[in-house]
Image: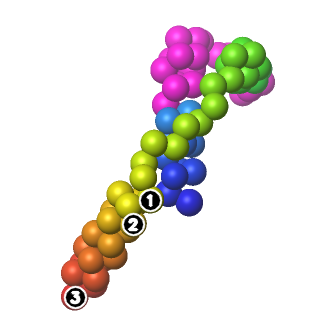
Amino acid sequence: MVVALGWVERLVAEITRQRIRRGTFNDVTELKTAINEWIEHRNQNPKPFRWTASAKSILAKHRRAKKALAIAKT
């Protein structure tokens, strides 16, 4: 779930930086059209997601997070 949220945040930041801030929109329809065009353009050259973290590092991060949450609850 956290990984998916991170991906969504990156995607929203990218579209904001590359398209939304550069344009002026008179209405929601124009904004939707601009977003859809940006997505179509981006999908013309897709890049696969490559997982780089090891299982060991993920589990270590999970343990640290659980410990931090346990401390925060006390």
Q: Residues within 10 Å of mark 3 (few under 14, many from 20)?
A: few
Q: Which residue is mark 1?
A: 55
Image quadrant of residue 52? Answer: top left
Q: Main secondary structure of the magenta part?
A: helix
- Mark 2 vs mark 3: in front: 2
Tell me the element at label 3: loop
Residue 12, image x and y in percent?
A: 55, 34
The amino acid beneath tag 3 is Thr
- Mark 3 vs mark 1: in front: 1
Marks 2 and 1 sit apart, C-alpha to C-alpha, by 6 Å
Tell me the element at label 1: helix
Q: Which label sits on residue 74?
A: 3
Residue 29 is a magenta residue = yes
The amino acid beneath tag 2 is Leu
Image quadrant of residue 66? Answer: bottom left
Q: In the figure, 35 relative to 7: above or below?
A: above
Quarter of the image for the C terminus: give it. bottom left
Residue 32, image x and y in percent?
A: 74, 26
- The residue range painted magenta reads 12-32
Front-lying residue, 18 or 46: 46
Q: Residue furthest bottom?
A: 74
The answer to whether marks 2 and 1 mark residues whose Cβ atoms lie closer than 8 Å is yes
Q: Residues within 10 Å of mark 1 (few under 14, many from 20)?
A: few
Q: Residues within 10 Å of mark 2 (few under 14, many from 20)?
A: few
Q: How is the image coloured?
A: rainbow
Residue 41, image x and y in percent?
A: 72, 15
Marks 3 and 1 sit apart, C-alpha to C-alpha, by 29 Å
Q: Residue at x 39, y 66 (%)?
A: 59
Marks 2 and 3 sit apart, C-alpha to C-alpha, by 23 Å
Q: Which label sits on residue 20?
A: none
Q: Which residue is mark 2?
A: 59
